[in-house]
Each structure stands twice: as C-alpha cells, then as structure tokens.
Image (spheres, helix red, strand yellow):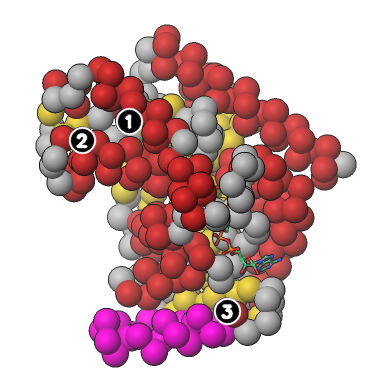
Amino acid sequence: MKITVVGAGNVGATCADVLAYREVANEVVLVDIKEGIAEGKALDIWEKSPINLYDTRTIGSTNDYTKTAGSDVVVITSGLPRKPGMSRDDLIETNAGIVKSVTENVVKHSPDAIIIVVSNPLDVMTYQAHLTSKLPRTRVMGMAGILDTARYRSFLAEALDVSPKDIQAVLMGGHGDTMVPLPRYTTVGGIPVTELIDEDKLNAIIERTKTGGGELVKLMGTSAWYAPGSAAAQMVEAIVKDQRRVFPVCIKLEGEYGIDNCYLGVPVILGKNGVEKVIELQLTDAEKELLNVSRDHVQEVMDVLDRING
Ligand SMILES: NC(=O)C1=CN([C@@H]2O[C@H](COP(=O)(O)OP(=O)(O)OC[C@H]3O[C@@H](n4cnc5c(N)ncnc54)[C@H](O)[C@@H]3O)[C@@H](O)[C@H]2O)C=CC1
Ligand SMILES: O=C([O-])CC(=O)C(=O)O
C-alpha cells in the first residue's frame, strides 16, 4: 500500500507522521511545492522510526509526482490556511488553483487512487478535486466531519468529566458555521447525551463546535493541525484496511436527504472502495431545515467556484 500526502505543511506533515506511526501503509510520499520541505519532513519522520518503532518508509518530493505513482490513497492538504479575521471561504481563489493543479498531477500518476481533500473551503475544494479528477464520487471525498465531531466529543467529555472514548456522535452539513451537530444521535457509553447534560450546556457546546476552527485560528494565528492531520489519517486507515468504519464524510450528494449535486458532510461507510455507502438518517423537520441552510451556503460557494473556473 502506498499513500501520498500533498502539502507538507502543518496538516500534511502531521497526517504523514500519524500514517507512519500507525503503520497504515508500507510507503508514505510527502509532496510540497516549496523546495526541500517535503524531503526534510519525510526524513525527520523516518529518523523517528527507531524511537517510535515503525517501518513505514517516508519519502519526500519537491513537486515530482513520478514519486507518487501508483498511490492507493492521496490526501490533498496543499493550500493556504486562514489567518485571524478570515473565513474559510476567503481562501477559495488561491486554493482552487492549487487543488486543481495538484489533482491533475495526482490523477496523471495515480489514476486509480482514492482522493481525500483537506484544503479549505473544504466542501468546495472537494467539488474542485471531483471536477478535475473526473473520478466516481465514491472516490473523491473531503475530511471535516471526523474533526468536527472530535471537537464536539472532546468538549462533551470535558463537560461531563468522562473519557472522550465513550462519546459517539454524528454531525452533518458543510464544514463551517452552518454545520449541523445532531444531539439526538449523541451518546455517552450508549446513554443519550440529553439524559446527562442540560439543554443550555449542550447548546453552548454545539455553538463552540461550530466555531471550533476559528477558536484555534484566534489562539495561534493559523489553523489547527494535530486533530485535522489525525482525522485525515483515520480516513486513510479505514480505506486501506477496509475497516468499513462509519464516519461523517463530505461527498457529492445525488438525491440523498433530498439534496442533489451538492457537496456536504453525511454519515458514510468507508472501506476499500472509498465511500461504500451513504447512510440516510430519518431527520426531523428541524434537522432537515438546518441541513438545507448548510446546503444553501455550500451551494453559494460552489457557484463562486464555477465562476472562477469559467
Ligand atoms: N478540512 C479541515 O477540516 C481542515 C482544513 N485545513 C486546511 O488545510 C490546508 C493546509 O493547512 P496547513 O497545513 O495548516 O497549511 P500550511 O501552510 O502549514 O501548509 C500548506 C502547504 O501547502 C503547500 N503548497 C502550496 N501550494 C502547493 C502546491 N501547488 N503543491 C504542493 N504543495 C503546495 C505549501 O508550500 C505548504 O507547505 C489549508 O487550506 C487549511 O485551511 C486545515 C485544518 C482543518
Ligand atoms: O478553521 C480553519 O480554517 C481550519 C479548519 O478547517 C478547522 O480547523 O476546522
């Protein structure tokens, strides 16, 4: 198994490190446009192998995609992160061009790869990669839901003073302030969360989750990487090991949830073929309305992308 991670910045390098550490594949290739950065970080991860005890080979490349040839899964993290005061959507112009050219290079050398997009604005960059790659929708997906639910679960664990391991949750919609956490599907060791926390506290956690990315941007002057890199690696692992894990993943909807031709996070089964199945929940009218608000927002940004692409 061979994995490529494009973009050896904060998120890409973290993802490559987790993939190596967990021995998800035999080989991880890290690519960046900046001279030497991918080679340096790949070498640094490899030099850590005798300490952390793994044998995944990590290889770096400055924009030479021949080294990525035949990759089974490719993670695209290349692109600008936002700075304080910016929204993810503000990145569209620059990142659309980057994701387009990277996807062209990726499919040229790995036509059978499954692509996981991380670059922001996430849902619309997934659309860009899907447009450019022309791969089936089940093989081009975006990472956001695992990260957003992880934030939600970690905040709940803190509030309830329980292990984050025991909190399960589903979250849907776009990767932004319109995301839709679903308390009805949130459990703590199998117990509905609504039995353990009062409504006000839960609502405050939901609001914090929606702006969880921005909270970190404000603190650090750039966006997060440990949780995002690990979340992308978890998706790679589910695919490479054909684990059939159930995760919220961004995919083009084709009629599911009454939504057509829009890229949104929904629960799916992830396995060796990519998205093996989109799970359709029976949403309440209120939940459906929130999902439609999210759809409308993502659709607007997709329209901007269409104008950029001419
Ligand atoms: N989907 C999600 O939940 C998350 C998405 N992100 C997004 O991921 C992206 C990367 O974030 P960071 O790693 O923090 O940024 P970073 O600035 O640390 O790394 C980005 C890397 O991409 C490289 N790059 C730029 N153009 C390239 C090209 N054409 N080919 C190859 N490499 C290229 C840069 O040289 C840089 O090393 C951003 O767009 C950010 O908004 C970040 C966190 C979570
Ligand atoms: O907030 C950002 O710009 C990066 C991101 O998507 C996240 O951390 O959720």
Query: The residue under label 1 is which amino acid type?
Result: Ile
Q: Is residue 289 left or right of residue 167?
A: right
Contact between labelled residues 3 and 2, with CB atoms less than 8 Å apart = no
The circle on residue 38 is 3
Residue topped by disc 1 = 205
Residue drawn at the location 70% of the way across and 68% of the way down: 105
Residue with the mark numbered 2:
159
**Residue placed farthest to the right in the image?**
310
Which class describes the residues within 10 Å of circle 3: few (<14), some (14-19), or many (20+)? many
| Image position of 143 (left or right of 50) | right
**Which of labels 3 and 1 is toward the front?**
1
Query: Is residue 101 left or right of 186 when viewed as pictured?
Result: right
The answer to whether residue 172 is seen in the rendering is no
Q: Position of residue 222 (x, y in %)?
A: 55, 55
Q: Which of 106 and 206 is in front in this view?
A: 206
Extent of the magenta region: 38-61
> Which comes sooner in the sequence, label 1 or label 2?
2
Q: How far apart are marks 2 and 3 (CA)?
A: 39 Å
Gap in angstroms between the C-alphas marked 1 and 2 = 9 Å
The answer as to whether callout 1 falls within 8 Å of ligand 2 is no
Q: Which residue is drawn at 61% across and 50% down?
A: 82
Cα distance in 3D space between marks 3 and 1: 37 Å
Q: What element carries label 1?
A: helix
* Location of residue 159 (image quadrant): top left
Residue 161 visible somewhere in the drawing: yes
Q: Residue at x 70, y 35 (%)?
A: 302
Q: Which amino acid does label 3 sit on?
A: Ala
Note whether 25 is above or below 279 in the view shown. below
